[in-house]
Image (cartoon, rainbow, N blue to C red):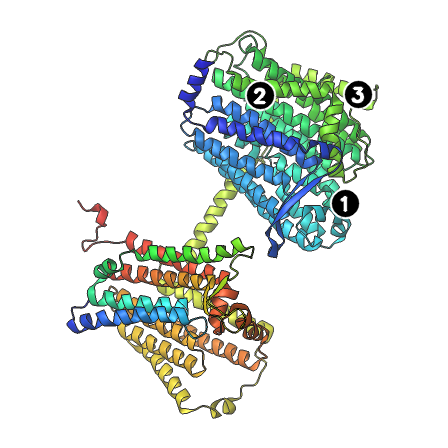
């Protein structure tokens, strides 16, 4: 933890921006550079910055949930996304898609695509995010 | 009745008891419906696809062999669980016991009913594990734990061999479905892999069914509670290996290797075990060794392989399960009511425990092979098959004759002695056990008598359908009978009785003599087992001390040394560096931005190597990483570049945080090692560069790239191929990776938290 007013003030803004950016990266990942892995890394970077500026305990309070629980919930979400396909008679981890508001006549109109693949990517995001913070926060408290 | 019901509720406190009886009983009744079809020679085959992409099906094959086993498992299971309500009902861990027993029963039923070899293997391992849990049920006794571990390691090792055999067999036969594999016997037997498959399968079967030289675990497994011994280690689990051999007979049997392996191992085990049985003074141990004898005999006759031999084997299989389960349950009652199983202490219990005596006596007469009990039929048909053999006739008939005569003696030792004569002093005053306990031996005894008097029923229900399934010929006419004419087999039976009677008369001096002979024998399997285990532990300790120094530098050194040797050896062995390096051409096309990155990375690397400050080293290493990320950006791999950048930033932060705790680099101390480290680092650099050049110059196989470029949008609706591969095409790999990430994070967290000390060097918990 550093007692720096500048860092402190900047952190509040930057953390918010980094989190927003991480979700942006997560969502665009299917068509453009990004995805759950990168998104999770960016999100974690935000909180690492937060913990350096405000201290590990403050970061834990802000997170509300233990980072290791976040990681495990992410793993559970990823697994659920895989199992989901089984209910439709497909093999484990087959992507299931729903094109919300798409025009059925136009094959190129995908509307707003919502899929089990996205859910899986959210799981990946939470795993990377939670695992990294588990490590960083424990290390910072150790020092 | 009212009183006993109240007693049940008080002592057994919960539904575990009656549930455990109801489940096997229901399965028994359910299985009976298949009797008609199976007895008519029509196997039932049903199943669902489980993992279709790997040819794993959850399929069930009900034919004469599997139905016989399923009925024995569920029928004896019902009696044993009923018996356990009284035998172990007031044990504090009784519900746990019931859970293990049910787990075992599911595994065993699955084993005998599976039509898929992979599924069969899974169930096979379930029986191994539940057997471990049940043998070690009295986990506060060192002997129980040792026996349980021994059984687990011996049968588990065999199980691994069996799995390897299954995979080979599946490749040879082109299917894991038993119903398909069994029809391809000629292809399998002619295949060059046949000897390997045979050895691996027999390793599994011999360890499971305790054939010599893997026999030693079974008598030790008698450390389990008696219902477990009666159920697992006599009637069902140990016959798993026998089941496997019988089941695979149409596919693997009929060759010389099969014949001699089974006939020699089985014949030797059967005589060896029956001699050891006579030597014991603990009646449960006597029964344990006679079980070994029966397993040997079954192996012997599967190996013999003629239709008559298979008929004898099927008859003896049913006969043995009926009498041996009854005898184990009987000795459990005696132990429960008198507090001892010692053959020299127990005398004259017959008047105190008449019903137990009755059940035990019928079973013992069946074991001795005395007409009109079914044991006589079992023995007669073994003799008949042995005499009809065209090879190894003397060995097969001789071993089974010796074993049968000794069985006669063992039957006398385990029932005649304890129940007749003058009542002797025992630790507890003997009285008859509760009905739930004596009903088992009595019912099984009546079956032994009933099947003996009506052999046609035994034939039609079990032996004929079983013989068809094992022998693979549904046209063969099986004909069981109690007595038809005075022939060679009948005369052998008479000779067996005479020899047995003489041996029984002198069995006490014989026992002493055998004891001295075995004491003098230098080859002892059980202590030998301990030495093997000790050797294994010593080896593990040695290699741990060698590899796990606990010094991070040495770990990393070892890892990179392995890498260098691996790459170097591969390049040298494959002569893979057979290309020309175009120095001029490779430099010509470089632009300013490329040179900048090269300078950037090189400077970082040099600074990392020469600095004396950890912080500087880490930061300089970060510079190298960012330079690499720049390379990714220049060659348009933005995903990788972003990941690389983020990881690099986080690694620098993480290591920097950790470094705050570490002392300055002890360069003076490390000076001697630095040239070695530098040499290794240089070697790695050269080798990796060579590999990179080799990869770039070689023909890159673009088939996968082409596929993903084409399929990404139409099949997975994504344009970012990297991400589509990660989350869709190869999602299960990603899932495995993120699971590893979570586990690594949790492990690191546990390590950091578990070793947290305060400033005084005390653990937080120690503070007062």
**On screen, A15 above or below B113?**
below
Element on which disc 2 rests: helix
Tags 3 and 1 on a common chain: yes
* Sequence-first tag of 2 and 3: 2
Mark 1–mark 2 distance (CA, rounded to whole Å): 41 Å
- Tell which subunit mark 2 falls on: B
Tags 1 and 2 on a common chain: yes
Residue B104 figure quarter: top right
Residue B233 figure quarter: top right
Residue at (63% x, 31% y) in the render: B71
* Sequence-first tag of 1 and 2: 1
- Name the one closer to the observer, B142 or B469: B469
x, y percent for residue B684: 45, 74
Relative to residue B747, is residue B354 drawn left or right? right
Relative to residue B579, is residue A113 drawn left or right? left
- Mark 1, residues whose alpha carbon is within 10 Å: few (<14), some, or many (≥20)? few
Mark 2–mark 3 distance (CA, rounded to whole Å): 31 Å
x, y percent for residue A125: 38, 64
x, y percent for residue B273: 63, 29
Element on which disc 1 rests: loop
* Sequence-first tag of 3 and 1: 1
The dot on residue B490 is: 3
**On screen, B112 above or below A30?**
above
- Mark 3, residues whose alpha carbon is within 10 Å: few (<14), some, or many (≥20)? some
- Tell which subunit mark 1 falls on: B
Element on which disc 3 rests: helix
- Tell which subunit mark 3 falls on: B
The dot on residue B628 is: none
x, y percent for residue B179: 70, 46
Residue at (50% x, 65% y) in the render: B728
């Amino acid at each position: 933890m550093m007692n720096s007013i500048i860092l402190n003030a900047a952190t509040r803004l930057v953390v918010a921006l980094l989190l927003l950016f991480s979700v942006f990266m997560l969502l665009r990942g299917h068509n453009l550079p990004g995805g759950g892995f990168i998104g999770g890394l960016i999100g974690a970077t935000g909180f690492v910055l937060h913990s350096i500026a405000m201290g590990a305990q403050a970061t834990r309070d802000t997170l509300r949930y233990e980072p290791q629980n976040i990681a495990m919930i992410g793993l559970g979400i990823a697994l659920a996304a895989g199992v989901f396909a089984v209910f439709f008679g497909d093999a484990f981890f087959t992507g299931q898609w729903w094109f919300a508001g798409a025009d059925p006549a136009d094959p190129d109109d995908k509307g707003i695509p919502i899929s089990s693949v996205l859910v899986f990517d959210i799981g990946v995001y939470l795993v990377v995010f939670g695992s990294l913070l588990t490590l960083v926060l424990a290390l910072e408290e150790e020092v | 009745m009212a009183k006993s019901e109240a007693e049940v509720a008080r002592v057994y406190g919960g539904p575990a008891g009656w549930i455990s009886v109801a489940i096997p009983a229901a399965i028994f009744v359910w299985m009976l419906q298949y009797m008609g079809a199976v007895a008519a020679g029509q196997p039932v085959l049903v199943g669902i696809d489980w993992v279709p992409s790997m040819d794993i099906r959850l399929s069930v094959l009900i034919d004469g062999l599997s139905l016989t086993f399923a009925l024995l498992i569920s029928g004896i299971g019902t009696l044993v669980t009923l018996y356990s309500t009284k035998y172990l009902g007031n044990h504090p861990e009784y519900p746990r016991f019931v859970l293990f027993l049910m787990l075992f029963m599911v595994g065993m039923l699955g084993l005998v009913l599976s039509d898929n070899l992979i599924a069969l293997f899974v169930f096979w391992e379930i029986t191994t594990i539940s057997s471990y849990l049940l043998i070690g049920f009295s986990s506060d006794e060192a002997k129980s734990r040792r026996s349980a571990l021994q059984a687990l390691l011996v049968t588990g090792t065999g199980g691994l061999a069996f799995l390897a055999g299954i995979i080979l067999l599946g490749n040879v036969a082109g299917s894991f479905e038993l119903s398909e594999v069994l029809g391809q016997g000629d292809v399998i037997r002619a295949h060059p892999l046949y000897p390997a498959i045979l050895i691996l399968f027999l390793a599994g079967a011999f360890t499971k069914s305790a054939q010599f030289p893997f026999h030693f675990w079974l008598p030790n497994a008698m450390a389990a509670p008696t219902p477990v011994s009666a159920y697992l280690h006599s009637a069902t689990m140990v016959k798993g290996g026998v089941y496997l051999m019988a089941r695979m007979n149409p596919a693997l049997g009929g060759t010389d290797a099969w014949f001699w392996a089974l006939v020699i191992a089985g014949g030797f085990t059967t005589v060896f075990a029956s001699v050891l049985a006579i030597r014991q003074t603990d009646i449960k141990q006597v029964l344990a060794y006679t079980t070994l004898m029966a397993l040997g005999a079954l192996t012997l006759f599967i190996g013999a392989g003629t239709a008559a031999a298979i008929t004898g084997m099927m008859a003896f299989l049913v006969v043995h399960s009926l009498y041996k389960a009854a005898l184990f349950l009987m000795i459990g009652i005696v132990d429960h009511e008198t507090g001892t199983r010692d053959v020299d202490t127990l005398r004259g219990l017959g008047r105190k425990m008449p019903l137990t005596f009755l059940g035990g006596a019928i079973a013992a007469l069946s074991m001795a092979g005395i007409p009109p009990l079914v044991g006589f039929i079992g023995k007669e048909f073994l003799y008949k098959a042995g005499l009809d053999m065209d090879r190894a006739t003397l060995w097969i008939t001789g071993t089974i004759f010796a074993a049968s005569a000794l069985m006669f003696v063992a039957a006398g030792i385990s029932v005649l002695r304890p129940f007749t004569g003058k009542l002797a002093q025992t630790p507890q005053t003997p009285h008859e056990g509760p009905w739930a306990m004596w009903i088992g031996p009595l019912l099984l005894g009546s079956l032994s008598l009933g099947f003996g008097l009506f052999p046609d029923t035994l034939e039609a229900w079990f032996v004929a359908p079983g013989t068809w399934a094992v022998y693979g010929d549904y046209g063969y006419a099986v004909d069981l009978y109690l007595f038809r004419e005075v022939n060679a087999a009948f005369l052998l039976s008479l000779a067996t009785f005479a020899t047995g009677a003489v041996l029984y008369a002198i069995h006490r001096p014989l026992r002493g003599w055998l004891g001295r002979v075995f004491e003098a024998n230098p080859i002892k399997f059980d202590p030998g087992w301990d030495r093997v285990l000790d050797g294994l532990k010593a080896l593990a300790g040695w290699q741990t001390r060698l590899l796990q120094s606990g010094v991070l530098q040495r770990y990393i050194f070892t890892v990179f040394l392995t890498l260098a040797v691996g790459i170097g050896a591969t390049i040298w062995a494959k002569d893979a560096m057979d290309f020309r390096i175009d120095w001029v051409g490779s430099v010509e096309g470089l632009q300013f931005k490329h040179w900048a990155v090269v300078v950037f990375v090189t400077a970082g690397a040099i600074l990392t190597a020469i600095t004396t400050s950890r912080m500087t080293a880490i930061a300089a290493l970060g510079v190298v990483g960012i330079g690499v990320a720049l390379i990714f950006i220049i060659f348009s791999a933005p995903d990788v570049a972003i990941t690389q950048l983020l990881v690099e930033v986080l690694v620098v932060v993480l290591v920097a945080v950790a470094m705050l705790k570490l002392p300055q680099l002890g360069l003076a101390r490390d000076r001697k090692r630095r040239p070695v480290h530098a040499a290794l680092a240089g070697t790695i650099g050269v080798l990796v560069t060579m590999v990179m050049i080799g990869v770039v110059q070689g023909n890159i196989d673009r088939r996968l790239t082409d596929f993903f470029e084409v399929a990404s949008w139409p099949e997975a609706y994504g344009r970012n191929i990297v991400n589509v591969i990660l989350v869709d095409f190869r999602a299960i790999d990603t899932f495995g990776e993120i699971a590893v990430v979570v586990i690594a994070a949790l492990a690191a967290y546990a390590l950091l938290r578990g070793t947290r000390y305060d400033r005084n060097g005390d653990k937080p918990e120690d503070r007062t």
